Image: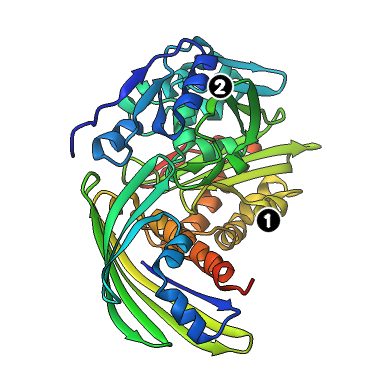
Amino acid sequence: MSGLRPFALHRPRSAEEASRLLAEHGGDAMVYAGGTELLVLLKAGLARPGCLVDVKAVPSLASIEAGAGALRIGATARHRDVERSPAVRAACPLVADVARHVANVRVRSVGTVGGNLAFADPHSDLATVFLTLDGTVRLEAAGAARDVPLTDFVRGPYETSRRDDELLTEVRLALWPAGTAAAYLKFGVHERPTLGVAVALSPNGAPDRVGAARIAVGCVGPRPTRLPAVEAAARGLDAAELARRAGELGALAAEAVDPVADLHGAADYKRDMTRVFVQRALTLAAARLAGRSPIVLHPHTVAV
Amino acid sequence: MQITREVLLPVSADVLWSFLWDVPRVVACLPGCVDAAEVEPQRRYRARMQQRVGPISIDVPLDVEILEADPPRRLVLKASGRDRLVGAEIAMRVTLACAPATAGSMLRIDADGRVLGKLGALGHGVIQRKAEEAVAEFAARAARAVAPA
C-alpha cells in the first residue's frame, strides 16, 4: 500500500458551500465524510483527487427525521446514528437493525449513510434495503436540487448518476403501511455480504394476507434490484401459502437475477444462493406476518 | 476476462483493413485511449489507456505489439502495461477478424485479457463490465467512422 498523495482539504460549513467547491473543482474533488471507503482507495492509489471536500462539519447533513409516511436520513448520519435513532426505530425498525449489522463496529462508528450510497459498492446492505422503501436520494448542486430514485441512482458497481458537481444530501424512504412484516437476510464469510435479500410484506384486508410485496436482492448483480415477478407471485397469498410456496418463489428469483462472477463467487453460485436466501427471507417475513417470531440460525448469516 | 463482439460495417473488407491501420482513427474509436504513437510501422505502437469507474481512475501506458497480420482478414495484437501509481497490470490479446458479409463486412472482436494488482482485487465483475462497455463503444464508433459520408 503506497502513501497518500498530497491533496487540499476543504471543510465547508454549509451544503451550499460544499456544492460550490464541488462545482469549482469538478472531477478533481471528492466528497469526504466517514472515509471508510475513500481512504482505502486513496491509500491504494486507486483514486487521486486534488482536493477533498470534508462535509462532516455541515450540520444540516447529519439530521434524521421521520414524518408524513417518510423517513429522511441525512447523508452524514453514521450507521451508528441510524441504529440508535429513536425516530428510525419507531418508523422502520428494520432499518435500525440493518444498520446495527453493517460491516464492523469501526465502520459503523464513522461510516455514513450517504457515503455508503454514493460509493455504490456492489457488496453493501443499505441500497438493497432502501429499495424496498422506494428510496430516493437528493442531489444538490449550486442553486438546484433533484431527487433521484435509487433504482436510477445506482448504475453499477461504484458508479452512480451523481454528477461531479453534485452533493448527495439525504436519502428519503417511503415508510411501509402499518402491519407490514419485513426481513433482511445477508450471507457472507467476509466483511462485505456475498448477498443480501430484503423482503417487506404489507397486508391487505386480512392481517396475514399479502397485499403488496417488496423484494430486493443485492450483491448478486451489478447493482441491487427489486424482483417484480416474485413480488407479483407473492401478492394475494396468505402467510401459510407464502411459506409453502417460498421455495417456488426462490426459484423464480434465481431466474430473475443477473449474477456477476466476482471474488465472492461464481455466477451460478450466486444464482443458487439467491434461490436459497429469497426462500429463507420470504419464509421469515411470512412467519412475522402471521404474528410469529422465529429464530433464524444459518451459518454465516445475519437475519434481522 | 474474455469478450467477443461482432459488428457489421457497411464497407468492404479492404476498406475495413485500411481503417484498422489508421491509428488516429482507431484511437478515436477507443474510449479512454490517448497519446497513441507509432514506434515501428505495423509492428509496435504506444498508447495510454485512461479509465474511470466511479471514484476509481487508472492511467496505463500500453505497449502494443502486432503479433499477426493476414490482410485483409485477421489481425492479432497484444497490449500490455502497468499503472505504476496504482500497481495495476493489464495484459490483453485482441484478435480482429474481418469477413465479407452481404451488406459490407463483419468485424469480429475477440479480447482475452487479465488485470492484476489492486485493480484486479476490485473483482472480475467490475472490470469485465467496463471492458465490455469499451468494446461495445469501439464497435459503435467504428461503425460510424467507416460509414460512407
Residue that carries the numbered disc 1 in the rendered image: A229
**Would residue A47 appear left or right of A80 to someone viewing this image?**
left
Q: How crowded is mark 2: few (under 14 residues within 10 Å), some or many (20 or more)?
A: many
Q: In which quarter of the image is residue B18?
A: bottom left
In front here: A169 or A279?
Answer: A169
Residue at the (44%, 36%) spot, across then down: A119
Q: Is A43 above or below relative to A223?
A: above
Image coordinates of residue B9 in percent, x first then y, are 57, 77
**Residue count near mark 1 (Cα–Cα under 10 Å), binned few <14, some 14–19, many ≥20:** some
Image point (27%, 60%), residue name: B62
Residue identifier under label 2: A73
Q: Residue at x 34, y 19 (%)?
A: A9
Residue farthest to the left?
Answer: A2
Front-most of residues A187 and A222: A222
- Asked if residue B111 is positioned above or below residue A267 in the image, the reply reads below
Identify the element where label 2 is drawn.
strand
Closer to the camera: disc 1 or disc 2? 2
What is the quadrant of residue B61 in the picture? bottom left
- Host chain of mark 2: A
Amino acid type at image mark 1: Ala
Residue found 64% across the figure and 57% down from its top: A245
Are circles 1 and 2 on residues that touch, CB within 8 Å? no
**Quarter of the rendering containing residue A287:** top right
* Mark closer to the chain start, 1 or 2: 2
Label 1 residue SS: helix
Q: In this view, does A290 lie to the left or right of A94?
A: right
